[in-house]
Image (cartoon, rainbow, N blue to C red):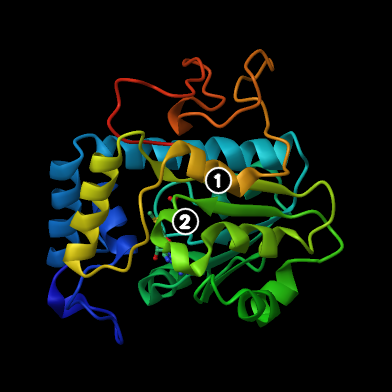
Amino acid sequence: MTDASVPQGIDTSRPTVARAYDALLGGKDNFQLDRDLATRVEEINPGTTVLAHENRAFLSRAVTYAATELGLRQFLDLGSGLPTVENTHQVAQRAAADARVVYVDIDPMVLAHARALLEENDHTAVITADLREVDRVMSDDATRRLIRPEEPVCLMLVSLLHCIPDHDNPFDLVRRYLEPFPSGSALVYSHLCSDRRERADDFTSGVLASGAPWGRVRSPEECEAAVAGLRVVSPAEDGSYPEVLVDCDTWRRPEAAPVERPADKPIWEH
Ligand code: SAM
């Protein structure tokens, strides 16, 4: 994207995670500093671009599962990212035309670009908000219009909580969002993690050096805090694999067996 086509109110003086992620996915809604950040993280951790694509494919499989297997009809997609292919509302509404989706993202570019896509979709809305302001998100007009508190909800925190620093208690946020939802609700979740502390710290330092807001790449054990007290769905379609968090590209992927801790990947997502 050239500076001539910068939407009003968008700051291009430093990169954002949403736009750098868009660059990793091969999108066009990003600027030079975002592309520089995407290049940098790929240098620090070769394979990050592939991982971003795998994460999107996981999101699509998980939303399809929530809509078809669990029968969920309302989706709260926190840190949704810029519109790309196979967005949550497209996947969910393909499975169930009456599915309702609220997208929440801190980056105003998301709303700027999603508007056109959603203009004729009464069942979908985008809010520009910081997910740490739980009350603000839940009391927003769009949330109140589309999310019925008495019905189960599919809460989505996909590739997001590594953007939230420890002092903002990322895993308490999961509980605060889930608590008021009735039984039958579900969480779709992935988080950048690494067994190798040094690599995780290099990735985190690289993003922070760019000026983009960021939290931390965490260990697999730390990432499990998000699902404490929840039943994990078996990552294998036939239920043959234990109910544990796995590498996202192997979750219910017909052609790949689930992998809990792949030894040959420097950084992966659960
Ligand atoms: N969930 C999408 C996916 O998995 O394809 C996008 C993931 S992208 C790596 C992380 C997104 O979270 C970005 O769009 C970023 O703007 C958003 N984000 C980061 N911190 C946030 C916050 N505090 N509140 C809301 N959104 C946030």
**Mark 2, other Cα within 10 Å: few <14 / some 14–19 / many ≥20:** many
Q: What residue type is labelled 2?
A: Leu
- The correct choice, above or below, for 135 with respect to 62 in the image is below
Name the residue nearer the viewer: 25 or 135. Answer: 135
SS at badge 1: strand
Front one among 45 and 7: 45
Picture mark count: 2
Question: Looking at the image, is 191 positioned above or below residue 80?
Answer: above
Q: Is residue 113 left or right of residue 99?
A: left
Q: Where is residue 118 in the image (x, y as percent from the top left)?
A: 53, 67
The percent coordinates of residue 113 (x first, y second) are: 39, 69
Residue kind at label 1, given as amino acid type: Tyr
| Mark 1 lies on residue | 189
Q: Are marks 1 and 2 in contact (CB under 8 Å)?
A: yes
Instruction: Write the residue at 19% across / 73% down.
Output: 14
The CA distance from mark 1 to mark 2 is: 9 Å
User: Residue 90, which numbered label?
Assistant: none
Q: Residue at x 41, y 64 (%)?
A: 165
Discs 1/2, front: 2
Q: Which element is circle 2 on?
A: helix
Residue 162 makes an appearance in the image:
yes
Q: Is residue 26 visible in the rendered structure shown here?
A: no
Q: Quadrant location of ligand 1? A: bottom left
Q: Earlier in the sequence, mark 1 or mark 2?
A: 2
Question: Residue at left 66%, top 26%?
Answer: 243
The answer to which image quadrant residue 232 occupies is top right
Look at the image and tell me in which quarter the N terminus lies.
bottom left
Residue labelled with disc 2:
161
Give the percent coordinates (x, y) of residue 256: 47, 16
